[in-house]
Each structure stands twice: as C-alpha cells, then as structure tokens.
Image (cartoon, rainbow, N blue to C red):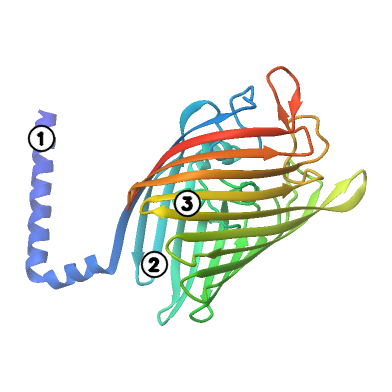
Amino acid sequence: MKILTYRFLVMIALFVFSWQVRAQNTSDSSSVSAMLKKGKLSLEGYVDTYFSNSFAHPENATHPYFVSYNRDNEVNVNLAYVSLKYASDRVRATFTPGYGTYMNSNYASERQTLQNILEANVGVKLFKDRDIWLDAGVIGSPYTNESAYSFDQIPYTRSLGPENVPYYLTGAKLTVPLDSKWTAYLYLLNGWQVIQAQHDPLDFGSQLEYKPNGKWDINWNTYIGNESSVANPGYKTRYFGDLYASFTPSEKWSFTADAYMGWQRRMEEQAMVTRKWWNLNLCARYVFTPGNSFSARMEHFSDPNQVLLTPVTDATGFKLSSVSLGYNLSITGEVLFRLEARYFGSPEQLYPLRDGTHTNKDLWLTAGITARFR
C-alpha cells in the first residue's frame, strides 16, 4: 500500500512539473531559448592503447624512467578519458577523469581521490570587452613541446624531456593577450607537478607565446619555487627555463624542438649546493601520401647529480640519449595507428637485465591505436 501511494505521489509531481514547464514555454519561449544559447556543453572521448616490448626485458615488466607507455610485453591502455567541457561568454570549465598506465605511474604520489584527475578547472573572463581569463584547478602544463596526449604529437612515445617536467599543474592561471601575435600566461602553483601542496609558500610559473603566422609557434616558459617536501626535505629553490618551437612549413613537413635547463638548490653533506639538469630534443614528420607519414626524433637528457631521476642500477649519474623512427597511419580523422622503434644509449649502466647484469642500452618496439572523439 505504501509503495502504491509513493508511486501515485510521484506521478502527480511529474504531472504538475510538466504542466508548469509547458506553461512557461508557452508564455516565454524566447527566454528559454536565450538561456540555452548562453552556454555550450561538449563531450570528448580519448583512448590510447599500446603494445611495447623492450629488448632489456625489465624484471618487473615496467620500463624504468618513464611514466608513458611503460608496461613491457603486454597490451595495455596508456591513457583513456571522457572529458566534459562547458563554455559560455564569461565562464568555462573542464572536468576530465583519466585512466590507464600513465595515470597509475604519474599520479601514484597523489591521494587516492585525486589519482584520476587529468584536468578539473573552472575559468572566468575578467572583463566583458577584453579576452583576459582566470582559470583555477588542475590544469595542463605549458612546459616542453609534448603533452600526455599523443594524438597531436609528432612522435608516438614521449620524449625524455617532457617525461621529466610537470605534465599537470594545480593552481591559478591568468591568460593575457598582448596583441594578435603575443600572449602571456602567469601561474600561481601548489608545486612542481602536484595536486596537494607539499610546502609553503606557493610557486610561480610563466609562459610567453609568440605566433607570428600560421607556420610558427614559439614559447618561453619559466618556473621558480621552493621544492622542499617530505620526500626531499633538503631541496630548496628550483629555477627552470624552457624554450620550444613548432614549425610547419608545408602540408608535408612538420618540425618541433625543445631545450631546457633547471637548477636545484639543495643540502648535501651540510652544505648548500646548486645542481643542474638539461634536455634537448628535435622531432620531424614527413607526410609522403595523404594519411601516411614517417616521424623521427633525436634527444639527450642529462641529470648527472640525480635531481629528478635516480638510476635503478648502481650507476652514479644519469645521462641518456635516444633516437627513434616511427610510421603513422591516419585510419580516419579520429583514429591513428602508429609504430615506433626507439633506441637508447648511455655512458652509464642504467638498465638491469634479468640475469643480474646491467647494460647501457635498450631498444623499444611500440605499436598503438589512438582514438579521439569530439
């Protein structure tokens, strides 16, 4: 009897609600249409599946020194997400939960409820007649010429340089167009790739973007902050500078290059010292027929004092170079098939072998299918 009564009340409520909506639409349909036009809600999906095999065959089936495409000899998902985006004249917002081996590796230090946040931010246009925006939350990083999303990148796998700078940032971002070619971005941040702040005070970042025409995109980025944390209590101020450019001279050729250097102040044996690391990479793509292209990359990453990377062997420093060659097939405008061979070499014995010895080189063979739906 109680269930029947409940259903009856629900039916009455639905009837009254529908009658009110119908009456409102009849009396003021123009205002409802105006409300619907105020904002736009969009949905985007992304799935990047891969198979990667390392000739060094890491014992724990994980390629050391990488968070992207790092599982060995298995088919897996590097990154998958569903992104919900809202945009209106004065407000924008993004919520993107992410999943995959990239998320497992790169967000392992975050708290459990934060480990699947790829992006989560809201932005406000500060002035009605000027395109100045203030965004806050978990946002994408401006550093280097590659991101976590392989779809628009020249190489398939990620370079050593981008793997060792923030993929994501948490804080506030101010976007200020200076003119039709120059745009400045200012950041107030919780830290170097963290969601939860590890120290006080907050850190700072900047980006200056120059687009002189449709062929060039040049960016200069900086970071400064106190990197003291529970994991690294002796770390103090970190300075970082990054310069990268993309050049597309024709429909057949695309190029991108990145160079950066960082300086870390830290305590070593009761003395304050400054240690530095640096990266350099160059990537190129050639489209030989519509939908088919070759890509290549050369790179070097140097961190001799192990500021960011600690060898998994007993090597005393970290220097690693890589060259790669890839083939890319655009099956449709939404789906890519990619193959890549990547060789690593180092003066240090950085790679452990299953027989207990170490080697200074490795070779990856990686294949992947990536789909993006908008």
Residue 101: x and y in percent read 51, 35
- Give SS at disc 3: strand
Seen in the picture, residue 368 relative to 21 is either above or below; the reply is above
- For the point 64% across and 51% down, which residue is it? 165
In this view, the residue farthest toward the right is: 270
Three-letter code, disc 1: Thr
Q: Which of pointers 3 and 2 lies earlier in the amino acid sequence?
A: 2
Q: Which residue is mark 2?
A: 91
Residue positioned 10% across, 35% down in the render: 5
Q: How many marks?
A: 3
Indicate the position of residue 261 as horizontal and vertical percent values: 73, 58
Question: Marks 3 and 1: which is nearer the front?
Answer: 3
Q: CA distance from mark 3 to mark 1?
A: 45 Å
Q: Is residue 125 above or below residue 332?
A: below
Quarter occupied by residue 206:
bottom right
Q: Say which amino acid is labelled 3.
A: Glu
As drawn, the label of residue 119 is 3
- The secondary element bearing badge 1 is classed as helix
Question: Could you classify mark 3 by the number of other residues whose Cα lies within 10 Å: few (under 14), some (14-19), or many (20 or more)?
Answer: many
* Mark nearer the viewer, 1 or 2: 2
| Residue sticking out furthest to the front | 288
Residue 109 at x, y percent in the picture = 61, 39
Q: Which mark is residue 311?
A: none
Categorize mark 1 by other alpha carbons within 10 Å: few (<14), some (14-19), many (20+): few
Three-letter amino acid code of the residue under disc 2 = Val
Q: Earlier in the sequence, mark 1 or mark 2?
A: 1
Pointer 1 residue: 5
The residue at 70%/44% (across/down) is 321
Residue 15 in view (yes/no): yes
Inter-mark Cα distance, 3 to 2:
16 Å
Report the quarter where the N terminus lies.
Answer: top left
Q: Tell me: 11 left or right of 89.
A: left
